[in-house]
Amino acid sequence: MISEVSYHGKLRTVCTHLKSKSCIETDAPTDNNGKGERFSPTDLVATALASCMITVMGIRAQLSDIPFETVSASVQKYMGTSPRRITEIKVEIVVQDVWNEKQRDIMEQAARTCPVAQSLSPELAQDVSFKYT
């Protein structure tokens, strides 16, 4: 087992990572009867995509001796109805490290093929962009 999830009333859950004991609380979003005071479960899915991309990029950077110090991402999630589900996730990855064209290709490919990206339904649009500053 990796985690336990318990209901804490008023549409809030507490998710505990069993190995580290770290916790994440979730709330239902305001557009679905919740308070929206924490990540919603679908927010976590969208955020997990960006987190996975950056993690895999970090692994690739170590293996390929590519500078990897200042990388971040912003995430946007779009919901559909009938059924209510995530229809699109937009991720903008901002890189302040200096990479040549070959390094950019290596890192962008690593991000786009991370395990979370590969696990999401093909029906869910993944709009991923890279901004080099």
Image (cartoon, rainbow, N blue to C red):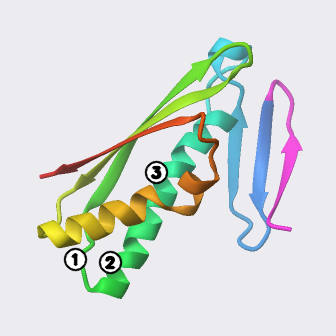
Disc 2 to disc 1, how far (Cα)? 7 Å
Q: Which residue: 74% across, 18% down?
A: 83
**Mark with earlier residue (3, 2):** 3
Q: Residue furthest front?
A: 122
Asked if residue 115 lies left or right of residue 16, the reply is left
Q: Which mark is residue 50?
A: 3
Q: Is residue 89 visible?
A: yes
Q: Does dot 1 land on a helix, a strand or a loop?
A: loop
Locate the N terminus by quadrant: bottom right
Q: Is residue 33 above or below residue 2?
A: above
The kind of residue tagged 2 is Ala
Q: In the image, residue 76 lies at what x, y percent?
A: 44, 32
Q: Which residue: 52% across, 50% down?
A: 49
- Mark 2 near mark 1, Cβ–Cβ under 8 Å? yes
Q: Which mark is residue 67?
A: 1
The kind of residue tagged 1 is Pro
Residue extent of the magenta highlight: 1-11
Q: Which residue: 45% across, 69% down?
A: 56
Disc 3 to disc 1, how far (Cα)? 19 Å
Count how many numbered circles sit on residues in the image. 3
Q: In the image, residue 47 lies at what x, y percent?
A: 52, 45
